[in-house]
Amino acid sequence: MVNPDGYPDYCLRCIECGKEYDIEDIYLCKCGGLLEVYIRGADISFKLDGNLEGVWKYGSLLPVKTNPVTLKEGSTPLYRCRRIEEMLKNAGVNVSVYVKHEGANPSGSFKDRGMTVGVTKAIELGKKAVACASTGNTSASMAMYAAKAGIRAYVLLPAGKVALGKVAQALMHGARVIGIKGNFDQALAIVREICSSEGFYLLNSVNPFRLEGQKTIAFEVVDEIGVPDRVILPVGNAGNISAIYKGFKELERFGLTESIPKMCGIQAEGANPVYRAVKSKKEDIEPVLNPETIATAIRIGQPVNARKAIRAIYESNGVAEQVSDEEIIEAQKLLASKEGIGVEPASAASVAGLFKLAGKGVIENGERIVCITTGHLLKDPETVINICGKPVEVEASVEAVRSAL
Ligand code: F0G
């Protein structure tokens, strides 16, 4: 059965025991398993015709029933990266490389796709406040959408470990921002308790509705170039890789596509539980207790969506890989200086991962590959200044400037 008003017939379903729920105000199954939105039926009203119209183009596969709280998110650019292709070709790997730049969203990260759905759901459920723990981008995005919706926003951050641009956003959009003397994983555990005691709506990626918005990354890729062979992206709390995989799977299930790309998750060496689990062919992670990486966005040791992400990797015949901070910075510089794409360090992990996988012979000639760059360069100006150094300063004269050219 399909609902009459254009939205799909859906429920929440446990990824472990399969139990289905028609209530929506829950985050976990009674058995403790993660929930996902299961679309039982839909009248698909969009065409995959190459015209991007933002997240809500795909409303007939998005589980909300009211007018969306939107800041015109999505429709991010997909760039063909010829210079990167050339470099890979010189190393003997002949592939097409695209970068989907999620930094071009309103708050500068892919989180906006999730928040337009998540905050709309908060309003639908009558919530007066939303909350999250964050390495930065989730908080910036949530604060922005809460402002648009006119509800309160509470943010828990690992103190001193969040890039400045993101803190600035959360503050200016009016969130109550609290730094904890601990890491992201601890902040998430605390905010989950606070949400259940205070009645706040939790907008971390354990919230299955938020991930529904993020699946539109897959829809947009297919809209523009069809199904690629491989998608490579950074993994932190492991929500995005799960969401994008779900997007590809849904298109296939509804008969719009016939294949699924290999999902490749890239982690930083110092925060690599998913990589280690996949390497040892396990379904569960062992937490990394003191995660550390220059890519603070993915400085996460106990990703809440690990089981969804690991399944996405196994089911799609994908891989997990780890990259060093040096490799991340090198890829960030390469994207910025050779392709004109400005990304924050975590985002560059995708391209660092591409080179690593190519070097290991994982990638086959002829593949069409999409790397997702998840956040904008301006999110983390401090790291950039540390890498590039400050601009030179000279006297205010033509001669001085000429000698400094
Ligand atoms: N890239 C960026 C720029 C991020 O901010 C994040 C996550 C990721 C990649 C990883 O995505 O968690 O879905 O695997 N940032 C979260 C935050 C944790 O709080 O902003 P994931």
Image: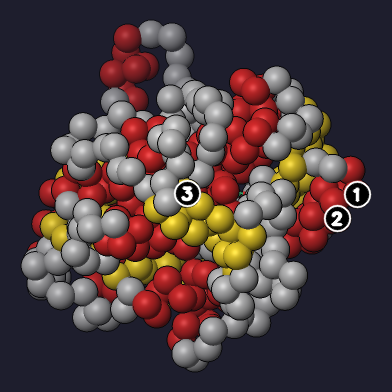
Q: Nearer the viewer, residue 390 or 138?
A: 138
Asked whether disc 1 touches disc 2, contact meaning CB atoms under 8 Å apart, the reply is yes
Above or below residue 227? Residue 378 is above
Indicate the amino acid at tag 2.
Glu
Q: Which residue is mark 3?
A: 9
Q: Where is residue 123 drawn, in percent x and y?
A: 67, 31
Above or below residue 17? Residue 97 is above
Q: Disc 3 beta carbon < 8 A from ligand 1? A: no
Residue positioned 17% across, 52% down in the render:
226
Spatial distance from mark 1 to mark 3, Cα to Cα? 31 Å
Q: Which residue is mark 1?
A: 197
Spatial distance from mark 2 to mark 3, Cα to Cα? 31 Å
**Quadrant location of the C terminus in the rendered image:** top left
Is label 1 in a helix, a strand or a loop?
helix
Q: Which residue is mark 2?
A: 193
Q: Is residue 305 toward the left or the right of residue 197 in the image?
A: left
Above or below residue 106? Residue 251 is below
Q: Is residue 84 visible?
A: no
Indicate the amino acid at tag 3.
Asp
Is label 3 in a helix, a strand or a loop?
strand
Q: Where is residue 179 drawn, in percent x and y?
A: 81, 44
